[in-house]
Amino acid sequence: LNIALLAGDGIGPEVIDQAVKVSNAIAKKYNHEINWTPALTGAAAIDAVGEPYPDDTHAVCEAADAVLFGAIGHPKFDNDPSATVRPEQGLLKMRQKLGLFANVRPTFTFPSLIDKSPLKRERIEGTDLVFLRELTGGIYFGKRGREDNGNTAYDTCTYTRVEVERLARKGFELAMNRSKKLCCVDKANVLETSRLWRETVQGLEKEYPEVTVSYEFVDAVAMRLVQWPNSYDVLITENLFGDILTDEASVISGSMGLMPSASLGTKTRLYEPIHGSYPQAAGKDIANPLATVLSAAMMFEDFNLTEEAQAIKDVVNKSLVEGIVSEDLAEGKKAYKTSEIGDWLA
Amino acid sequence: LNIALLAGDGIGPEVIDQAVKVSNAIAKKYNHEINWTPALTGAAAIDAVGEPYPDDTHAVCEAADAVLFGAIGHPKFDNDPSATVRPEQGLLKMRQKLGLFANVRPTFTFPSLIDKSPLKRERIEGTDLVFLRELTGGIYFGKRGREDNGNTAYDTCTYTRVEVERLARKGFELAMNRSKKLCCVDKANVLETSRLWRETVQGLEKEYPEVTVSYEFVDAVAMRLVQWPNSYDVLITENLFGDILTDEASVISGSMGLMPSASLGTKTRLYEPIHGSYPQAAGKDIANPLATVLSAAMMFEDFNLTEEAQAIKDVVNKSLVEGIVSEDLAEGKKAYKTSEIGDWLA
Ligand SMILES: CC(C)[C@H](C(=O)O)[C@@H](O)C(=O)O
Ligand SMILES: CC(C)[C@H](C(=O)O)[C@@H](O)C(=O)O
C-alpha cells in the first residue's frame, strides 16, 4: 500500500504518528507493506513554500492508493480578515483537486464511554448513524467576493443535478447495506439548491424501492439530532449543512477526539479525524489520537482488509475499557500521553 | 395597545388563542386596553386569497404597535418542488417588508423541567443565553434560480456592512445589559460574508470596551452549544446559521414548545414562538401554548410593562411546577389541553 501522509497543522503531526504506528503494527502482523510518503499541507506548507496545498503534495496524493490526513488550520490566520493565503484554502483545494466529493462521517457510541456524553444514556444508547456530506460543491466552492468598496460581501451556493445525484447514490447504497433508511437534509422551504437536492433524491427513490427516504429541514435535524440521535441511520446533505451537523453529532460520542472520517473521490480516498488542528494542544503530546487511528481502520476496511480494520477497532475498544485514554476522557483518572496511547495500541 | 394578530397555520391559531386569553387577563388586571386586529398569513392566506402575506395583512401590521404571530407552513407544499407559491414566502416577505432585522431568541431552563432535557442536568443548569439572529439578509434574500435547463441551482448569500453593523450593535447593547460577553458566530475560514461579519464586529469592539468578544466558527458552536451551553451568553449570527443554531439550542430547555422570540424591526416589532406550525398536531388542542404566551410576555416587556411581563412569566412557572402541562411535558402524568392551559393561566 502506498499511502500519502499529510500531517498538517496543530495536533495533526502527533495524532498522525500514532495512526502510523498502529498501521505499521497491523501491516507487520498481517504481512502487508506500507510505504508512507509524507507531504506538506496547511499552515506548515504556507510557512515552508508559501502555499497551503503545493503541487508536489498533490502529485504525492494522486500517486498514492490513499491519503491519511491530520488536520489543517492555525489561529494566526483566523482573526486576520486581510490574510490572502489561508491554511483552509489548502484543505479546500485538496478536496477539489482530488475530487473528494463524498465525506463519510460515522457517529457511534462506545459502551465504555456512554456516560461521558453530555446527552443522557437513554437518548444515545445504540446510536449508530452516518452522515454523507457533499464535499466539493455548494457555498464552499461558489463565486465569492466584495463589491461597493468592500462594503458588500457575497458567497454563492451552487449545485448541479450531477453533483447531487452522485452523492445521493452513495447514500442509497450505504442505506442498502444498513437499515435501508435514508434522510435527506435540506432547507427546501427557502433555498433553490435544496429544492434541486430534494427533487433529485426523489427522482432516485424508484431505483432503490427498498429504501425508506425522509426529507427533513436542516433546522429540525439540528434539533432532533440531539433529541433522538438513534432515530437516524444514513443522512445525506450538502457541504455546509454537513459541516455543522457532523460536528454537532460528534458530541454524542462524548469526545470530538473519537470520530473518524473517510472521503471518497474520483482520484483517491482520504482518511482523517473530524476534529480540527486544536492548536492549544499542539506539541504537548496530550491530544486524543483515536479518531485518527480509527480513520486508518476505515482505510483498511476500504481496501477490503476487514480483519485488519476489525483488529484496530478492537484494540481501540480495549484501550477505552482499560482506561488507556488521553486527558479529554480521563475524568480525574490517569491521562495517558498521545504517544503512549499509540505505543500501547501498536 | 394595538396588536396585529397573525395566527397563521397548523397549531398557530390554537396557541395564539391562549396568548390572547392571557394578555387580555393581564390587560384587565393592569387596566390596559388591547385592540387585537386579526389578519391572514401563510397557507391559510394562500387558500383564502392566493398570497401568503397579502397587502391587507401588511397594512394591519404596519398600523399596529406590535404583531403577535403564530406559525407558518403546511406539509402539502414541502414535498412539491414545483409549487410556485409557498407559505414560507409569506414569512420571509413579512420579515423583509416590516424590516424585522434582529430576531432575539433566548434559551433558558426552567428548574422544574431540567430533567426533561436530553442533556444532563450538570451541563445545562444555569443556562441563560440569547441568540441575536439577523433576519432580513443573507442567503434567505439573495438572488436564487436555475440555469442549464433546471439542472443547476444557485442561491446567493449577501451582506452589507450596514446590515451587519446594525445587528452587531444590538448584540453589544444586549451584552452590556447582561454579562458583557458576546460571541460572533461565523464561518470566516471559508465565507467572504463571514469575513465581512468578523471585520465589522472587530471594528465595533473599541466602542464597547467593556464587552469581551469571542469569534467562533459555526461548526464549533454547533458542538459546544450542546457540550457547554452555559459557557455562552449573547451570540450574534447571520440568518441561516441562526436558524440552525437556535433550533438546536431549543433542545436544552427540554421542549421546543417553550421558547419565545421577538423580532425587532424598523417599522414594528413581532413576537412569535420559535416552534413551527407542527401540522401533525393541528386542530387537536394538544399543542404547548407556553412559547406563544412567553412571546406575549416579551411583548409587554418591550412596552416597558415589566410588571405585566413578570406576572406572565410567574404564572407560566407556576403552571410548570403544578404540572398543568401539555403532552410534550406530561411524561405519563395527566396532559392538559392547549385551551385548558390557556384558561388556567388566564
Ligand atoms: C477547516 C474547515 C474549512 C473545514 C470545513 O469547513 O470543511 C472543517 O471544519 C471540516 O469540517 O473539515
Ligand atoms: C419556516 C422557515 C422559513 C423559518 C426560517 O428558516 O427562518 C423558520 O425555520 C424559522 O426559524 O422561523
Image (cartoon, coloured by chain):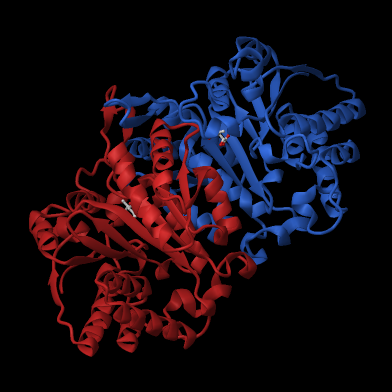
Chain colours: A blue, B red
- Picture quadrant of residue B23: bottom left
- Is any part of residue A190 visible from this angle? no
- Picture quadrant of residue A267: top right
A122 sits left or right of A30 in the view: left
Image coordinates of residue B248 in percent, x first then y, are: 48, 56
The residue closer to the viewer here, A205 or B146, is B146
Above or below — where is B116 with respect to B210?
below
- Is any part of residue A88 visible from this angle? yes
For the point 27% across and 24% down, which residue is it?
B149
Image coordinates of residue A113 in percent, x first then y, are: 75, 56
For the point 82% across and 35% down, which residue is it?
A307
Instruction: Tally the numbered discs.
Output: 0
The residue closer to the viewer here, A182 or B206, is B206
Above or below — where is A3 with respect to B96?
above
For the point 41% across and 42% down, which residue is it?
B201
B259 sits left or right of B68 in the view: right
Image coordinates of residue A60 in percent, x first then y, are: 68, 13
- Picture quadrant of residue A173: top right
For the point 55% across and 38% down, which residue is it?
A132
> In the rendered view of the protein, which quadrant contains the C terminus of chain B?
bottom left
The residue closer to the viewer here, B184 or A119, is B184
Image coordinates of residue B132 in percent, x first then y, are: 38, 54
B95 sits left or right of A184 in the view: left
> In the rendered view of the protein, which quadrant contains the N terminus of chain B?
bottom left
Above or below — where is B32 with respect to A67?
below
